Image: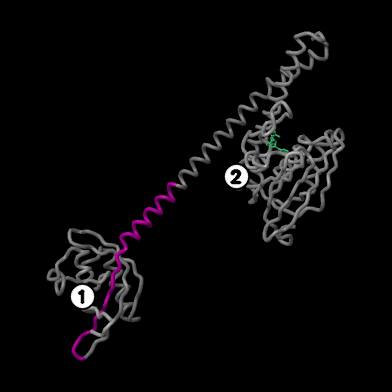
């Protein structure tokens, strides 16, 4: 032995290698097999060598494949690699293996032989099976979740519709009572009546928002994609808010916005909710709302900045949750649904949404949307 080097016993290296070795003749007869493969298959050497063919270790389908494809290819190419097979061991046990094979040409004293190595694929097959099961389970869960979501949404929809009619009847009665001055000014009844009015208006708002929410599904596949002019979507929102804009003296700065693909109604709803909030959560000063945008890589970021009350920056994620409100209920009316709708719209269109603020210093709501190739769509 040369100092510093360790020569392994080649016999041991062959017999106890971490993979199986088998040598076969032209007809598949097994000429040699190493201990590793023998122990995997649970055979003794004398049961196999000279007694069995490689085909004997295969199932019916693989036997045909071996004879019609594998051997002809090996004879022709002299080498084949990474062929999946399943070897049958003693007691019909099965061993999934990956076979590599090489031809050893005939010599003066040896006929043509073929050396095959077999890698044990049991673990790999197990992982693959687990992966397939896990993927199937995940798909089933997603499907179930979708179903539950749809049921929930249709419940919200039906319940809101059913509540709408009696509520509008109550509202009509209230206005009738008011109109006919049936409540004595300064009486206790007037105070109670004011309470009823406030609650009815809150409930009307809630039903309106719930209906809007159920209209916008959390599903990008439900969208009919069309080219959208975001400036037009802003204009629709501003038209609806016209009365509030006049009342508060609000000013909106809106530049030429980039084109997007998506749902027109959803984008109108997005701007309507964001602009409504900019007016609702205003400070003492007249609202000034600025829309800006920039392109970063494959996304456009659109920002809506106001000079309103702002909010606690620690709540910047919470405010997008369903029915989450940061301001006290009595201070400004609302349902906590508007920003959840905005989040749905943006996510349905492949973007994300966020907000930044400091109390008393206004807020910026931003959202991203994938850049569209104008030549392709417009
Ligand atoms: P709502 O306005 O009906 O309460 P939203 O979902 O639209 O519901 O908003 C959630 C919360 O986020 C609001 O209750 C408010 O506290 C905060 N918020 C939203 N927009 C603004 C804004 N522009 N300025 C300050 N706070 C805001």
Residue 118 falls within the magenta-colored stretch = yes
Residues under numbered marks 1 and 2 in contact, where contact means CB atoms less than 8 Å apart? no
> Which residue was labeled with disc 2?
219
Identify which residue is drawn at 72% across, 40% down: 269
Instruction: Using residue 185 as the reference point, say whether residue 132 is left or right of it.
Output: left
Q: Is residue 345 above or below residue 175?
A: below
Instruction: Using residue 315 as the reference point, say whether residue 30 is left or right of it.
Output: left
**Quadrant in which the C terminus appears:** bottom right
Local crowd at mark 1 within 10 Å, few (<14), some, or many (≥20)?
few
Q: Nearer the viewer, residue 121 or 316?
A: 316
Q: Is residue 132 above or below residue 271?
A: below
Identify which residue is drawn at 76% across, 53% down: 293
Does dot 2 land on a helix, a strand or a loop? loop
Residue 158 percent location from the top left of the image: 61, 29
**Quadrant in which the N terminus appears:** bottom left
Precedes in sequence: disc 1 or disc 2: 1
Q: Residue furthest bottom?
A: 108
Picture quadrant of residue 288:
top right
Which of pointers 1 and 2 indicates the residue nearer the eye? 1
Q: Nearer the viewer, residue 278 or 55?
A: 278
Picture quadrant of residue 173:
top right
> Which residue was labeled with disc 1?
12
Identify which residue is drawn at 73% across, 45% down: 364
Residue 338 falls within the magenta-colored stretch = no
Residue 60 percent location from the top left of the image: 26, 63
Identify which residue is drawn at 49% across, 43% down: 143
The region drawn magenta spans 108-137
């Amino acid at each position: 032995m040369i100092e510093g080097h360790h020569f392994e016993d080649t016999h041991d290296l062959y017999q106890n290698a971490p993979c199986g070795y088998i040598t076969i003749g032209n007809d598949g007869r097994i000429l040699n097999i190493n201990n590793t493969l023998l122990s995997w298959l649970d055979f003794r050497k004398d049961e196999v060598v000279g007694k069995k063919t490689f085909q004997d270790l295969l199932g019916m389908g693989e036997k045909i494949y071996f004879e019609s494809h594998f051997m002809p290819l090996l004879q022709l190419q002299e080498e084949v690699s990474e062929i999946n097979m399943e070897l049958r061991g003693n007691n019909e046990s099965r061993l999934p293996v990956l076979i590599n094979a090489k031809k050893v040409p005939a010599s003066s004293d040896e006929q043509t032989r073929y050396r095959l190595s077999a890698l044990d694929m049991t673990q790999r097959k197990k992982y693959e099976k687990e992966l397939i099961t896990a993927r199937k389970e995940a798909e089933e869960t997603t499907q179930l979740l979708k179903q539950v979501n749809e049921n929930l949404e249709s419940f919200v929809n039906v319940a809101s519709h059913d509540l709408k009619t009696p509520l509008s009847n109550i509202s009509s009665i209230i206005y009738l009572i008011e109109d006919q001055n049936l409540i004595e000014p300064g009486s206790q009844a007037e105070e109670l009546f004011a309470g009823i009015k406030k609650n009815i208006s809150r409930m009307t708002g809630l039903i309106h928002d719930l209906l809007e929410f159920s209209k916008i599904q959390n599903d990008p596949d439900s969208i009919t994609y069309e080219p959208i002019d975001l400036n037009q979507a802003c204009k629709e929102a501003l038209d609806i808010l016209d009365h509030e804009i006049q009342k508060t003296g609000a000013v909106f700065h809106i530049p030429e916005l980039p084109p997007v693909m998506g749902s027109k109604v959803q984008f109108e709803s997005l701007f309507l909710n964001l602009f409504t909030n900019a007016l609702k959560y205003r400070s003492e000063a007249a609202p000034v709302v600025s829309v800006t945008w920039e392109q970063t890589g494959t996304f456009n970021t659109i920002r809506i900045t106001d000079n309103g009350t702002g909010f606690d920056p620690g709540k910047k994620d919470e405010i997008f949750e369903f029915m989450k409100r940061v301001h006290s209920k009595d201070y400004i009316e609302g349902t906590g649904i508007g920003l959840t709708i905005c989040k749905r719209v943006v996510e349905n269109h492949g973007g994300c949404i966020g907000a930044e603020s400091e109390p008393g210093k206004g807020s910026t709501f931003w959202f991203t949307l994938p850049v569209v190739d104008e030549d392709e769509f417009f």
